[in-house]
Image (cartoon, rainbow, N blue to C red):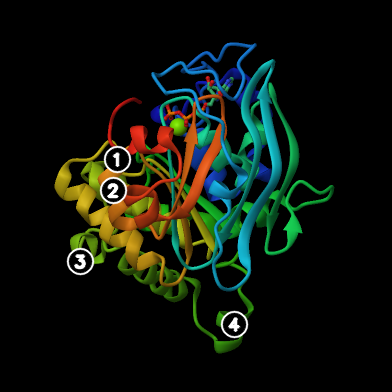
Amino acid sequence: MTNSTVTDDTAAERIDPDETAAADDATAADGTASRTEPTTAIDQSATADTTTTGESEERTDPAWRTYSFPGDPVLSAESLDVWYGDDHALRDISIEIPERSVTALIGPSGCGKSTFLRCLNRMNDRIKSARIEGTVSFDGENVYADGTNLVELRKRVGMVFQHPNPFPKSIRANVAYGPRKHGDIERGLVPKLLGRDEREKEDELVERCLRDAALWDEVKDRLDDNALGLSGGQQQRLCIARCLATDPEVILMDEPASALDPIATAKIEDLIEELAEEYTVVVVTHNMQQAARVSDQTAVFLTGGELVEYGDTDQIFENPESQRVEDYVTGKFG
Ligand SMILES: Nc1ncnc2c1ncn2[C@@H]1O[C@H](COP(=O)(O)OP(=O)(O)OP(=O)(O)O)[C@@H](O)[C@H]1O
Ligand SMILES: [Mg+2]
């Protein structure tokens, strides 16, 4: 598995293959998600007013981050702070994410979008220098509480990365990987009671997930071919199918289309919108049009690891409260 080398030594030390869900393996195969190299050094003395990317100075108002929606949040963070060593990457983040919708996370490079996303299913635990304070709740439970089952958490809160990272196995084996690893296919009680064999159940699972990932028609005649022979856009949809196979409730996506051409990107965007009918999707993107097109609500992180504004996507793009957010979404900096 040549592309699965973990580029982050500290993370590599911490990866326990038996403790992980499919999403974990995906991280191990993803250079971006597991890197330790800081991309943007933040001045240790930075304050909320510090500007390193051309942002104007501005005091923020907590009301700008308050977003009301019907129903209970499926995921929420409260007073979340993250440090990498002395680098304060996220500052006092509080946010509630509604279910069955698309939440976009936007902001300039280094503002903490990926860090925040990784906190939601504790993928940041892998980074030795990372320290977290505050709470993240999923389905009403604090995921940072002692005794949280990380395998279960990462099955329920799955993840898709910037660079498609299928395993060098067949298309079928990629989709069935998570359930096979966790015994859901081998030991499933229902198929045993029904007297069906594993292969039949696996075929159903593979087809369902590939259909849900809008890939089935393109690969149905070559399920046993190596996944690395697929195009980049197809590989990314396969990674989404692999994520769906562990039956998640939330799908976290970190710039899922940034390595793809416009046609493949459009397919991923359509897929995100479809997935949100059944799943809660949280997507990081640098592409403003993409955020505006696919998301229901948008959270804007700015330099210093601050959540500056969160609200209905149309409002954020058309009538933001914050001058800095307006400058960012209109391309004046970042
Ligand atoms: N594994 C790590 N080890 C040390 N510092 C890190 C690590 N990952 C991120 N950082 C630092 O934390 C801060 C936030 O980084 P993060 O990757 O979350 O930003 P981002 O908003 O996702 O940026 P980009 O848009 O470039 O992906 C940056 O200062 C970065 O250098
Ligand atoms: Mg990032």
Furthest residue in direction bottom, as rendered:
194
Residue 219, given in percent of the width and then of the height, sits at 22, 60
N-terminal of the pair, mark 3 or mark 2, is: 3
The circle drawn on residue 287 is: 1
Neighbour tally class for label 3: few under 14, some 14-19, many 20 plus, Cα within 10 Å = few
> What kind of residue is marked 4?
Val
Look at mark 3 in the image and give the residue it sits on. 217
> What kind of residue is marked 2?
Gln
N-terminal of the pair, mark 2 or mark 4, is: 4
Q: Give the distance between the C-alpha atoms of the residues marked 2 and 4, in whole angstroms.
A: 41 Å
Residue sitting at x 76%, y 46%: 144
Res 91 seen here = yes
Residue 51, above or below 268: above
N-terminal of the pair, mark 4 or mark 3, is: 4
**Residue nearer the viewer, 259 or 314:** 314
- State the SS at label 3: helix
N-terminal of the pair, mark 4 or mark 1, is: 4
Residue 279, given in percent of the width and then of the height, sits at 47, 66
- State the SS at label 2: helix
Rendered-image quarter of ligand 2: top left
Look at mark 4 in the image and give the residue it sits on. 190
Q: Give the distance between the C-alpha atoms of the residues marked 1 and 2, in whole angstroms.
A: 5 Å
> What kind of residue is marked 1?
Asn
Residue 109, above or below 65: above
Res 226 seen here = no
Q: Give the distance between the C-alpha atoms of the residues marked 4 and 1, in whole angstroms.
A: 44 Å
Look at mark 2 in the image and give the residue it sits on. 290
Residue 139, given in percent of the width and then of the height, sits at 68, 64
Figure quadrant of the C terminus: top left
Q: Which quadrant holds residue 101? A: bottom left
**Residue nearer the viewer, 180 or 92:** 92
